[in-house]
Amino acid sequence: MPVVIVGAGPTGVSAATALARYGVDCLVLDRWTDVYPQPRAVHLDDEVFRLLAGLGVGEQFAAISRPARGLQLRDPDMRVLAEFRREEALSANGYPQANMFDQPDLERLLRDNLEKHPNAVLRGNAEVIDVVPISADRARVTVTDRSTGEQHCVETRYVLGCDGANSLVRKAIGSAMDDLKFQQRWLVADVMTDADLGQWDGVHQVCDPGRAATYMRIGPSRYRWEFRLLKEETADDYATLAALCPLIRPWVDGVAPEELDLVRVAEYTFRAQIATRWRRSNMFILGDAAHLTPPFIGQGLGAGLRDAMNLSWKLAGVINGWLPEAVLGSYEDERKPHARNLIRFALAVGAAMTAGGRVGDALRRIVVPRLHLIPGVRDKAVDSATPGLRASGLVMRSPGRRQLAGRLCPNPIVSNGKRFDEIVGRAFAVVSAVPITTAQRDEMDRRGAVVIAAQPGTELASWLRAGRAAVGVVRPDRTVLTAGRSVAKVLDAVPAFAPDVQAAHV
């Protein structure tokens, strides 16, 4: 078996799907037979929506999600300090910038989609109890069948540890979690109701050092509240609707208690941690096994899906003989700094909203209502773009401030109503605002790259011009490998990747 994936959450299933779409056989092992039924993550941005569409579930995710219209910052008395609205127009990635959903719905969608790919097998009731390397290119995974108690061993070329915060694979590679000195206990409550709460249809963040809180409408009739727990409190103190109502009253005032259905109340300890190493030889960790992000910017689940998409196409390239194994080193080089940046940003946002006690509260009352007067702040507050990837073997940055390399290319409608991603599929792409010779085009065909002309006046042409480039190379995960003015130099960077990719389309 070329790849064994430990853990069938969104990260593991997404990695398996991406690999299967390149014809790579993989086995996904999970100790449970079904998805975890309780809601957890509720937000994904447009970049991750784009990744889901690349897995073939874009329309399905749109059907189970709803766009969030922005953010309100409120003071402890529920007065609006500032409001940052998101436009309804789609982003440069082609999707709404913020999307609310129910995680069990997403997981079922991903599993249903995985079943369409015979190269991937998901085995539930399979608890992985040991992972050990047995050679430079082989590992042994020991599994217990939870229904019979029998143990089995599977040998594989690569192991992907998508097994969560208590990852067995992380321990197997000799990695530990680097604690970024953040830990808070929060109460998370989900409520269903058909009543009209009459609230502004976006995220409400209560900036209160005493009781920070967040309100979100997740679906047509489902709502979530998150409250920071006080030192002496636990979730058991709010296990009933009657006990919870004093906390949620500002949002449900006027709604009869019998119209509210308490779905669940849970206590979560939010942490900020990142693994010291993400790889040992042929074993990798992804998702919560590699990083834990506080929820203040809604990037925890999205970071895991980014891990899956970043690693999967590289792994497929190595297994299929298209890429040298050395490219796998770029996974940690690219993803670890990106995840760390988002964790630090989440910590900064959390501190800005809740820190400082009474003094901080007074400053927020003065400063926050004036934020919109600062040029660019309003746009930045609702901008979903994440930092670009650092230089690696597959991100070739050049001197200068305007860098396209390491960032996502746009996803505009290019021709015949089709977007860039639909045309390119799972291949590399060359986007050029200048003519490419017949010989160069033939060479790109031989290497499996799709050539797209950036016609004058189009979004792609404007994107290249803003990056001071005439041509760019886009990887299968839509990250720019390199861009510049010399066509010959840029084209030399295109690897011979998936020459039969068109035949491999599903």
Image: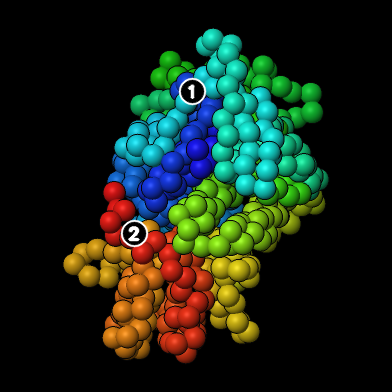
- Classify residue 416 as left or right of residue 177: left
Q: Where in the figure is residue 4, as x and y percent of width and height?
A: 54, 37
Is label 1 in contact with label 2 (beta carbons under 8 Å)? no
Mark 1 and mark 2: span between their CA atoms? 31 Å
* Mark 1 or 2: the one toward you: 2
Name the residue: 68% across, 38% down.
Answer: 134
Q: Secondary structure at mark 1?
A: loop
Residue lying at the far front in this picture: please name it: 135
Mark 1, other Cα within 10 Å: few <14 / some 14–19 / many ≥20 = some
Q: Is residue 143 visible?
A: yes
Provide the residue designation for mark 2: 501
Residue lying at the far top in this picture: please name it: 148
- Classify residue 176 as left or right of residue 162: right
Q: Where in the figure is residue 104, as x and y percent of width and height?
A: 45, 30
74 or 377, which lies in front? Answer: 377
Name the residue: 56% across, 78% down.
Answer: 403
- Classify residue 386 as left or right of residue 33: right
Provide the residue designation for mark 1: 124
Disc on the earlier residue, 1 or 2: 1
| Image quadrant assignment for residue 139 | top right
